[in-house]
Amino acid sequence: MAFGTLSLKGRALRLLSQREHSRTELQRKLAPHVQEGDNLAAVLDELQAQDFISDTRVVESVLHRRAGRLGAARIRQELQAKGLAPEAVQQAVAQLQPSELERAREVWRRKFGAPAAGPQGRAKQMRFLLTRGFSADVVRRAVQGWEDPGAEG
């Protein structure tokens, strides 16, 4: 019995050493490895009590890794998929809102670098940003901001 618990704990620690995981993610990944006599909930409780599992660090990690490339909608989706509390997800998304347009423009600049030649090109650029999780309003402002003749020096 103790060996199985160590095995689950070992697997959990290995996963946590690679990146931050939420309790829900660990539960989903470790469930197939539970053997008779193992208590997955107890292992996760212990890891959480020792601060190996932290929803706050999971949120910070996702924001750090993904905010430069994705809009708030996609990040919200990722955080929800990790099984985080709705309040934590909402707070994280609220942190992203002030920089949403700036981040969309930076993603656009890295991908395209120049305004589209025509409506089809502009539509392609807008679809690209929409799939990255930026809102329609932000996408429109980001793409049109670069095409505005008054914006050029």
Image (cartoon, rainbow, N blue to C red):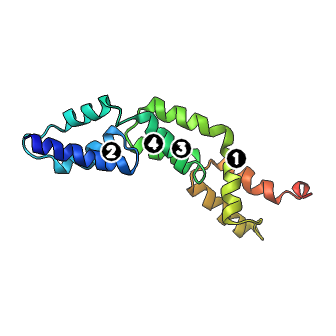
Of circles 2 and 1, which is in front? Answer: 2
Q: Label 2, secondary structure: give it.
A: helix
CA distance separating discs 1 and 3:
16 Å
Residue visible at 57% across and 55% down in the picture:
132
Q: Which residue lies under the disc numbered 3? A: 63
Amino acid at circle 4: Leu
Q: Tell me which numbered mark, 4 or 3, is placed earlier along the sequence.
A: 3
CA distance separating discs 2 and 1:
31 Å
Q: Tell me which numbered mark, 2 or 4, is placed earlier along the sequence.
A: 2
Q: Do residues under tags 2 and 1 come within 8 Å of each other at their CB atoms?
A: no
CA distance separating discs 3 and 2:
17 Å
Q: Label 3, secondary structure: give it.
A: helix
Q: Do residues under tags 1 and 3 come within 8 Å of each other at their CB atoms?
A: no
Q: Which residue lies under the disc numbered 1? A: 101
Indicate the quadrant containing the C terminus: top left, top right, bottom left or bottom right: bottom right
Q: Which mark is residue 25?
A: 2
Residue visible at 28% across and 35% down in the picture:
47
Q: Nearer the viewer, residue 110 or 51?
A: 51
Amino acid at circle 2: Glu
Give x and y (percent) for residue 11: 24, 49
Q: Do residues under tags 2 and 4 come within 8 Å of each other at their CB atoms?
A: no
Of circles 1 and 3, which is in front? Answer: 3
Q: Which mark is residue 79?
A: 4
Give x and y (percent) for residue 36: 7, 44
Q: Do residues under tags 1 and 4 come within 8 Å of each other at their CB atoms?
A: no
Q: Is residue 9 above or below residue 152?
A: above
Q: Tell me which numbered mark, 3 or 2, is placed earlier along the sequence.
A: 2
CA distance separating discs 2 and 4:
11 Å
Quarter of image, res 94: top right
Q: Label 1, secondary structure: give it.
A: helix
